[in-house]
Amino acid sequence: MLPAAARLRRSDEFRVVLRRGSRAGRRRLVVHALTTDPSGAADLPPAARAGFVVSKAVGNSVVRHRVTRRLRHLVSARLGTLPAGSALVVRALPPSASASSAELGADLDAALRRLGLTPSRRPAGDAPRPTRPAEADPDHGSAV
């Protein structure tokens, strides 16, 4: 379970993130992100916060709660890597009902990368691998 300081609770907080934030959609979920604090009043940068929207289109109450628990677990593992003061709203789509936790996690990571909230798979300092074959390099020293 997310700590109280890490949750969006009031409908106006959700509304601000949904209206002013940027959005990244995937097959099973949509992530709305606002990188500034929606409450607007803070001397110290607050921790990242998250909220979840799982409608009846996803399934009955048992299915909706299962999806919410999975998403909550996935987001709580990633909250520490998000910028301070950011707010997320994760909206589950109907295909999330039959998705595994790994599939939901992959969609969540892809959405966060698209929003620029997490680094890409390759660290920024790494150079891309050369695309030319090794024998094209005259200083390679290969006898072949």
Image (cartoon, rainbow, N blue to C red):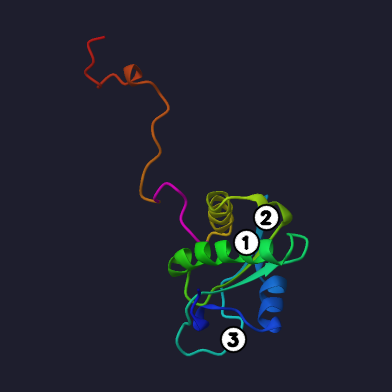
In the drawing, does residue 127 fall left or right of residue 72?
A: left
Query: In the image, what residue occupies the spot 25% across and 21% down?
Result: 140
The disc, 3 or 1, on the residue closer to the chain's N-terminal end is 3
Where residue 116 sits: x, y (%)? 54, 59
Q: Which residue is mark 3?
A: 40
- Say if mark 1 contacts mark 2, CB within 8 Å: yes
- The mark that comes first in sequence, 1 or 2, is 1
Kindly identify which numbered label has been placed on residue 143: none
Q: Give the residues drawn in magenta, as a range.
A: 117-123
The residue at 56%/90% (across/down) is: 41
How much space separates mark 2 and mark 3, taking CA atoms? 35 Å
Give the label on residue 67, or none.
1
The image quarter containing residue 34 is bottom right
Q: Which residue is mark 2?
A: 97
The structure residue drawn at horizontal position 54% and vertical position 73%, both measured from the top left corner, is: 86
Quick check: can you spot residue 75? yes
Question: Is label 2 in a helix, a strand or a loop?
Answer: helix
Location of residue 35 by image quarter: bottom right
Front of the two marks 2 and 3: 2
Q: Dot 3 surroundings within 10 Å: few (below 14), some, or many (20 or more)?
A: few
Q: Is residue 60 left or right of residue 45?
A: right
